[in-house]
Image: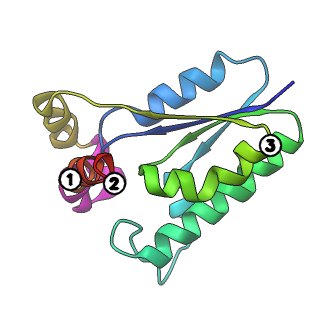
Amino acid sequence: MARKVWIISGPAGVGKSTTARRLAQDMKKSAYVSGDDISHMAVSGRERPWESEQANDLVWKNIVALTENFVEAGYDVVVDWVSFWQDVKRYTAHWIEQGIEVRYVILWADQDVQSNVINAGRARRRWGSGSSYCEMSFEARVHQNATT
């Protein structure tokens, strides 16, 4: 049976983690991989992945390695990470060639709803001052990637 990897993306505060966890819980045998948790594993000298291609690449390499370990053990995997189509294609092409089904989902919410979540502090606690930057950058990159 072909394994599935779900990549749940969207701007800060849209509900990626909640959605990804619930999706994983509803599957028979699954693992949840949090890109945020992986991103914060580097303790000192850490660069922000939305500001550094090298930091983003490191997070992706770790997401891929962990996901591959779970897939090899017979798990479907749900990844929660602010990801863009170009990165998804780059890091998952070999999975598709191996017959692993990759599903890329972008969550979106009204700007008012999203701003309320960020202002309430959930996203700001996780992303710090970068949460507003990520929100605006995500929308710009999604539109940019849609045209390429």
What residue occupies the far bottom of the structure in this picture?
A: 45
**Residue 148: numbered disc:** 2
In magenta, the rendered stretch is: 122-136
**Residue 66: numbered disc:** none
Residue at label 1?
140
Mark 1: which amino acid? Ala
- Label whose residue precedes the other's in the sequence (1 or 2): 1
Q: Position of residue 10 (x, y in %)?
A: 35, 40
What residue occupies the far front of the structure in this picture?
A: 148
Q: Secondary structure at mark 1?
A: helix
- Marks 1 and 2 in Cβ contact (< 8 Å): no
- CA separation, marks 2 and 3? 32 Å
**Residue 70: numbered disc:** 3
Q: Is residue 147 left or right of residue 3?
A: left
Q: Nearer the viewer, residue 10 or 45?
A: 10
- CA separation, marks 1 and 3? 33 Å
